[in-house]
């Protein structure tokens, strides 16, 4: 009789330690990585008109594009975008030349996109002003670090 009790106890213990089913509750579920958000800004001139036809290329783009009639350009957060300001006369804060082509980078609410770091081939480095304008030389090409 004691043998039967010992065998029954061993079988019961075996079932308790191993469980009844074959499911595994420790399945690895990879974390959900949010996709980067697309940001859209606009180029406008000193009169508030959109700048269409400005060539630009961001890091995620395979080929350069041109700003459409509304001056729109899009990029992903943290991306660098290069613009070619060919045929623009430039803008320099202390420049006595009154015919500067002042360009602003603005949101869809027409608020300036200030504090954006940039490098221009001819002008050098800087940060956009609070109104979204920036300094650059005639026919310059500039990279912005969004």
Image (cartoon, rainbow, N blue to C red):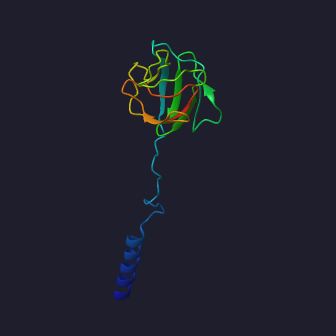
Choose between 7 and 101: the one closer to the eye. 101
Q: Which of 62 and 30 is in front in this view?
A: 62
Residue 106 pos. (x, y %):
43, 23
Can residue 117 be seen here?
A: no
Rendered position, 52 above or below 126: above
What residue is shown at x 39% (from left), y 24% (from top)? 112
Residue 55 visible (yes or no)? yes
Q: In which quarter of the image is residue 88?
A: top right
Q: How many numbered marks does the figure carry?
A: 0
- Give the residue furthest to the front: 96
On the image, which quarter does residue 67 sit in? top right
The location of residue 68, given as percent across then percent down, is 58, 19
Residue at the extreme right of the image, as rendered = 63
Residue 95 x %, y %? 44, 23
**Location of the N terminus (image quadrant):** bottom left
Direction from residue 141 to residue 131 in the image, left or right: left
Residue positioned 38% across, 28% down in the render: 129
Up the image or down, 3 lies above or below 69; here it is below
- Give the x, y percent position of residue 27: 46, 58
């Amino acid at each position: 009789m004691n043998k039967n009790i010992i065998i029954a106890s061993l079988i019961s213990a075996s079932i308790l330690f191993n469980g009844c089913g074959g499911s595994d509750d420790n399945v690895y579920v990879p974390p959900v990585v949010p996709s980067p958000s697309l940001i859209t800004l606009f180029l406008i001139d000193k009169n508030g008109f959109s700048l269409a036809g400005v060539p630009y290329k961001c890091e995620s783009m395979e080929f350069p594009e041109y700003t459409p009639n509304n001056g729109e350009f899009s990029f992903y957060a943290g991306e660098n975008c290069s613009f070619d300001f060919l045929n623009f006369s430039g803008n320099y804060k202390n420049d006595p030349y009154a015919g500067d082509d002042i360009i602003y980078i603005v949101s869809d609410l027409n608020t300036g996109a200030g504090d954006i770091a940039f490098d221009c081939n001819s002008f050098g480095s800087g940060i956009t002003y609070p109104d979204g304008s920036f300094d650059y030389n005639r026919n310059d090409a500039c990279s912005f670090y969004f």
